[in-house]
Amino acid sequence: MDREEIAVRNLSSSNRHMFPYVHKVGVPPKKHPWKEFSATLKETFFADDPLRTFKDQSRSRKFVLAMQAVFPILDWGRSYNLAKLKGDLIAGLTIASLCIPQDIGYSKLANLAPQYGLYSSFVPPLIYAFMGSSRDIAIGPVAVVSLLLGTLLQNEIDPTNNAVEYRRLAFTATFFAGITQAILGILRLGFLIDFLSHAAIVGFMGGAAITIALQQLKGLLGIKKFTKKTDIISVMQSVWGSAYHGWNWQTIVIGATFLAFLLLAKYIGKKNKKLFWVPAIAPLISVILSTVFVYITHAEKRGVQIVKHIDKGINPSSMNQIYFTGEYLSKGFRIGIVAGMIALTEAVAIGRTFAATKDYQLDGNKEMVALGAMNIVGSMTSCYVATGSFSRSAVNYMAGCQTAVSNIVMSFVVFLTLMFITPLFEYTPNAILSSIIISAVIGLIDYKAAILIWKTDKFDFVACMGAFFGVVFAAVEIGLLIAVSISFAKLLLQVTRPRITILGKIPRTNVYRNIQQYPEATKVPGVLIVRVDSAIYFSNSNYIKERILRWLIDEEERLKRGGLPQIQFLIVEMSPVTDIDTSGIHALEELYRSLQKRSVQLVLANPGPNVMDKLHASSFTSLIGEDNIFLTVADAVLTCSPKFAEEV
Amino acid sequence: MDREEIAVRNLSSSNRHMFPYVHKVGVPPKKHPWKEFSATLKETFFADDPLRTFKDQSRSRKFVLAMQAVFPILDWGRSYNLAKLKGDLIAGLTIASLCIPQDIGYSKLANLAPQYGLYSSFVPPLIYAFMGSSRDIAIGPVAVVSLLLGTLLQNEIDPTNNAVEYRRLAFTATFFAGITQAILGILRLGFLIDFLSHAAIVGFMGGAAITIALQQLKGLLGIKKFTKKTDIISVMQSVWGSAYHGWNWQTIVIGATFLAFLLLAKYIGKKNKKLFWVPAIAPLISVILSTVFVYITHAEKRGVQIVKHIDKGINPSSMNQIYFTGEYLSKGFRIGIVAGMIALTEAVAIGRTFAATKDYQLDGNKEMVALGAMNIVGSMTSCYVATGSFSRSAVNYMAGCQTAVSNIVMSFVVFLTLMFITPLFEYTPNAILSSIIISAVIGLIDYKAAILIWKTDKFDFVACMGAFFGVVFAAVEIGLLIAVSISFAKLLLQVTRPRITILGKIPRTNVYRNIQQYPEATKVPGVLIVRVDSAIYFSNSNYIKERILRWLIDEEERLKRGGLPQIQFLIVEMSPVTDIDTSGIHALEELYRSLQKRSVQLVLANPGPNVMDKLHASSFTSLIGEDNIFLTVADAVLTCSPKFAEEV
């Protein structure tokens, strides 16, 4: 007695009392086309129902709510208290000590003078504190965006020979980065940044971190002539090419010593979470120690490169420096969009991570408006693109920040620095800044995430590595392009080649499941059950039709070889088919006709509301017959098997 | 008493005959990463297993099979017989009589001299007959591709003043159209043309038909000065602007008479399918009658425009006219890709339609290689882009064609025409050609399909109308762009905003279904059941997490208002979730944590093989506990409800 005979026996003996009742497939009540359309629009753009709190409120209350929506500080500020201030004060001071040396270093990545990094840590955090809704993010310039901006800008203007135009283009790009972010938020297109997959971001960030670290070899080895390209091959050629004459041993000693110190501090902070402040203040201590050392020993006369000069005073206005006309307008616009999107991705990822940890809700679109506003204002006050920093946000969180007030504290410290302390940075060696950047970006190489991606999803891993190698071996923008392309290709692949599986009956149940996942599941004689695991759209309708036919032909050949009775019913389990379009219905009609020619009856199981609606509208239901549509596969099999038994 | 015992007990009281047994969720056997990857690649590019017949064959047999694969005529030619020849002969003669006047008219749409249309009906059909596998398609120039090519080419070169360069660019574009088609086929990227949705094609074709018909007003009204733009506003301005001085009443009389005749013939053919030959030969009869009429009355001296001259003799070589260098290379390349893709879409749609009607298989990728080869050869023999014609293929089918031999017959008739008859077309009035084109393209306006699209899918209808109005009010390429963009937007929307529904128990069954589709379904107290209707990918993972949480919050608020017990279990029905990536797993983890904070237990029902695999690999299964994953929602509810009952 073979497998299939057993199945028949099973059916006749046990299934009779199982489904004493066959429920009809429901057709949802007809909706007005406009209502249907607006419901789709609402779910696409206003999925979070942002106006929910405005319902049934007086006009003045609505105004207050609107002001609170734009400036959340008006909401949380009312319950602010001394206990919270204490946490914010400590956190703010800690991130300030971390951000000052980082800012000076990062502005070099963007090919800008050091004060511009500090400027960008003064105005944007203030704006964000009033408009943003994340409690843990630390705002300011970040390594990856600085590098990206620097690379894209120097493709257009040489930063050494045309410093003024270069800076103007930087402000223009910052302005449009802000505009992009704000518009995405206002138009509620925030979901667009979701199109960069996690895997692609991991690869991109890791690649950018390596690229940034390699760039620091210039400062760390004291090389004067260095390539402007960022790919690993050009950089290593530059490094080895200058190995005999270009390296400066005094610089190397200073750099290596402090790099070791910083990495040790990082290690300590990692081992003991309570000592989080050690790596947080280590950079500032390094800067102070090394500056004093250089000042005393006059090492700058022995070839140790120093910062030399930082402008004193707060941000000058740069409103009239933004290009609103001319060829640089479109270039700044294009660069701004790219930098703005990447900055957004980073900030939103950080915001979401900490919101999930502390379990508060974050409105992505509102967040984008805040970030956009902050960069627009920034571009008019000599700042370049600022966003949320991974490393500083983590420190902020661990130092016990309570609200965005920690950003205000940090901003105030940077203000004091700009007003009084900048001249003291004159003798700070560049090698220290390089060490600080290296120790900061190392944290961006998330090899554990990469391993997990490899384990979970090979395709994701390809995207991750594509972005990584693109950044490391070609250029930042190439890596980004690869990341986006692979992400899109994956989505399109999903809608082009959906999975179509054969189902079998799981023994001792009435459940039909994939026979690959459940090898113990048995096929029902005379019936082929397939499940389509996707909406049936123009992009896959032909594939689905042809795949199902091929399953049928394979199965028929197999049965013929075994001398077994042929298939008479093809049941298509439609549960996962969320939607169907006109091309999909055409494909079903063609499938039905092809099956008719082979004397196989098409039977549908559990079409969803949308699908039922459209099958009705297109009269497909009357073509195959309403009584060939069932609520469950089990119902369908029950109805088909007796027919089969009668005929055989 | 442990969980399973409870389940069993519970079962024994009421559900004994329904679910006597809880089956474990299967984890598919671990596959080697490379095998998994290559299986995906195979299913993407070689879904139809093209090398299947080559298995276990001798080397000489393999050679024969390969030759037959490239030249299907070697396969079907062996069983060719007189009966088939009879059908092909009649069909070939019929489509030849239809194609000759159409070709002369269509070449005008492409801004080429009339003989180039005839050339394109001589060589390409011959090549196709040897390499193609469709039995019903009729090859040659078609209206929409001619218009598209004409529009794109005249954007680059003026066809009146620089006729030679224009023609060279046309051959270059044809060459690259062929290359594009062949490469898509060879690389098995044929599925790319599936990205143009049925709705978009209906709209685009309808728009193109209207545009082409409007262009014919020039010939039909005898207007000499006519706009080069194709949008309806420019054309109507041109028509009305020349209303008093530019129209020629003799032309109008001739044109209107024969247009009426052609439309009447079309109507007769539609009413009585047996009289299909009436509309098929009507154009040729019109040409003959009107030519004789003009020749006798010398109407050309009264302003009736005539064809004047068609080169005699067959296709000259154009191999050395293709631009392989210079600025026109890239322009020809770009135009060729667009025209090639559209031509491909049309040919494949026709091929599939008739293959489905006669129930034979058509290999899309092989078809593309055939079409590509035919256009490459065509570009070297003074042809422009040829493809399958809707109107002539339908006539071919109705005339009883059996194989591609009907194309050979047609090609031979065109050959005879080129050799001997072309001088006779000298006096053919242009108005007749315009009438013929109008009566041909009217069939492309598929208003019934548009109505069906409106009924079935509102979003599809927007795509359809977008393409239609884009072509009619802007330009052919704009309409095309709109069609492609809307098609993509729809796919992306699907993967960004998947449907998430609440399930309830259908009375008297053990089945859980969407409560919107089945209003009679009841919720289970203390349990919220949601179903995610899509793969969980980076593009939607955040949305899914937030949507589920919002369902939960809404439901909790509702329960609180009603003083009902709160939710303790959230069951996520995963049947439709075909795949999950690392971002998706992150989202699930975040969902799990958020639920923990609300004392709600996350329970999964029926994750598929892929999903189970990845949940295991990422240790998510151990995070939520293996015993919180069930085969069916019913199993999950059975296990959750008793716990709930105990605690309340």
Image (spheres, coloured by chain):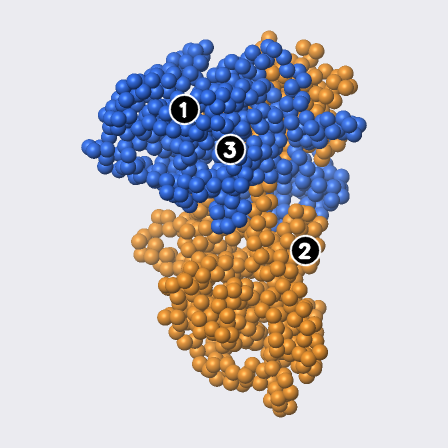
Chain colours: A blue, B orange
Q: Secondary structure at mark 1?
A: helix
Q: Which residue is mark 2?
A: B450
Q: Which residue is mark 1?
A: A423
Q: Residues within 10 Å of mark 3 (few under 14, many from 20)?
A: few
Residues behind callouts 3 and 2 on a single chain: no
Q: Please, what is the three-letter code of the amino acid marked with disc 2?
A: Ala
User: Contact (CB < 8 A) between labels 1 and 3?
Assistant: no
Counting from the top left corner in percent of width and height, residue B556 is at: 70, 20
Residue A179 visible, this angle = yes
Mark 1 → mark 3, Cα distance in angstroms: 17 Å
Above or below, B184 against A288 in this view is below
Counting from the top left corner in percent of width and height, residue B638 is at: 64, 19
Mark 3 → mark 2, Cα distance in angstroms: 61 Å
Residue at horizontal 31%, vertical 56%?
A: B60
Parent chain of label 2: B
For this rendering, which residue is in front, B143 or A11? B143
Q: Secondary structure at mark 3?
A: loop
For this rendering, which residue is in front, B97 or A36? A36
Q: Which residue is mark 3?
A: A316
For this rendering, which residue is in front, A284 or B563? A284
**Mark number, residue A107:** none
Q: Please, what is the three-letter code of the amino acid marked with disc 1?
A: Pro
Above or below, A528 against A280 in this view is below
Residues behind callouts 1 and 3 on a single chain: yes
Parent chain of label 3: A
Residue at horizontal 63%, vertical 12%?
A: A81
Residue at horizontal 50%, vertical 70%?
A: B158
Q: Quadrant of residue B359?
A: bottom right
Q: Please, what is the three-letter code of the amino acid marked with disc 3?
A: Pro
Counting from the top left corner in percent of width and height, residue A621 is at: 69, 46
